[in-house]
Image (tube, rainbow, N blue to C red):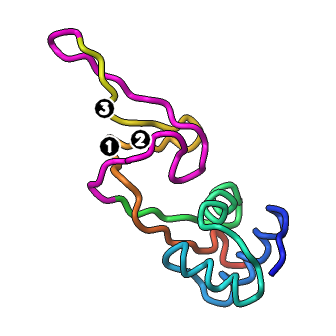
């Protein structure tokens, strides 16, 4: 196993997607990378794929609430709290949003499945 920079990781992901067309689930993509002796976390796979101009990431959302409000589950950027005041004037956090990728935990819910595919099929 060896570690590599983001550009190298993107190239390995693109190589896998060219062979398979698409990969359902970050853990499945991680297993494919492990086959070619690349050690990487699912969080890093998501971050690199989301930044890439050549990789499309489709995200399926569930109705669950985001339990950890410190990093975006899509791009790993810091999340901002969405606050609301009740009739008594008490302010509470009702959700989280990301300014980088426009993720919003209130409207979209919690991501549960990532599907990776090539954006441009002629690569």
Q: Secondary structure at mark 2?
A: loop
Q: Residue 104 has which mark?
A: 2
User: Viewed as shown, does residue 109 lie left or right of 39?
Assistant: left
Marks 2/1 in contact by CB < 8 Å: the verdict is yes
Q: Is residue 13 left or right of residue 31?
A: right
Q: Which mark is residue 107?
A: 1
**Residue at the image position 71 percent from the left and 59 percent from the top:** 53
Q: Is residue 17 above or below residue 3?
A: below
C-alpha span from label 2 to label 1: 6 Å
Magenta stretch: give its range: 62-89
The quadrant of the rendering that contains the N terminus is: bottom right
User: Where in the figure is residue 119, as x and y percent of width and height?
Assistant: 63, 68
Near mark 2 (Cα within 10 A), the count class, few <14, some 14-19 or many ≥20, is many
Residue 79 is a magenta residue = yes
Mark 3, Cα crowd under 10 Å, few <14 / some 14-19 / many 20+, is few
**Element under disc 1:** helix
Q: Which badge, 3 or 2, is on the more N-terminal residue?
A: 3
- Which comes before the other along the chain, label 1 or label 3? 3
Does 91 sit left or right of 23 as displayed? left
What main secondary structure does the magenta stretch of the protein show?
loop
| Depicted 27 relative to depicted 103: above or below | below
Find residue 69 and report its horizontal and vertical position in percent.
Answer: 46, 40
Classify 2 as above or below 93: below
Disc 1 crowd rating (10 Å Cα; few below 14, some 14-19, many 20+) is: few
The image quadrant of residue 28 is: bottom right
Look at 62% across and 78% down and name the residue there. Answer: 30
Residue at label 3? 94
Q: Is residue 123 visible?
A: no
């Amino acid at each position: 196993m060896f570690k590599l920079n983001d550009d190298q990781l993107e190239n390995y992901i693109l190589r896998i997607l060219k062979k398979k067309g698409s990969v359902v689930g970050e853990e499945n993509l991680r297993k494919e990378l492990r086959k070619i002796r690349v050690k990487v976390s699912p969080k890093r796979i998501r971050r690199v794929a989301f930044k890439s101009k050549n990789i499309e990431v489709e995200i399926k959302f569930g109705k669950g609430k985001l339990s950890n409000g410190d990093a975006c589950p899509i791009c790993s950027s810091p999340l901002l709290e969405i606050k609301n005041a009740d009739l008594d004037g008490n302010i509470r956090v009702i959700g989280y949003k990301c300014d980088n990728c426009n993720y919003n935990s209130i409207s979209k819910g919690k991501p549960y499945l990532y599907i990776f595919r090539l954006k441009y099929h002629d690569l």
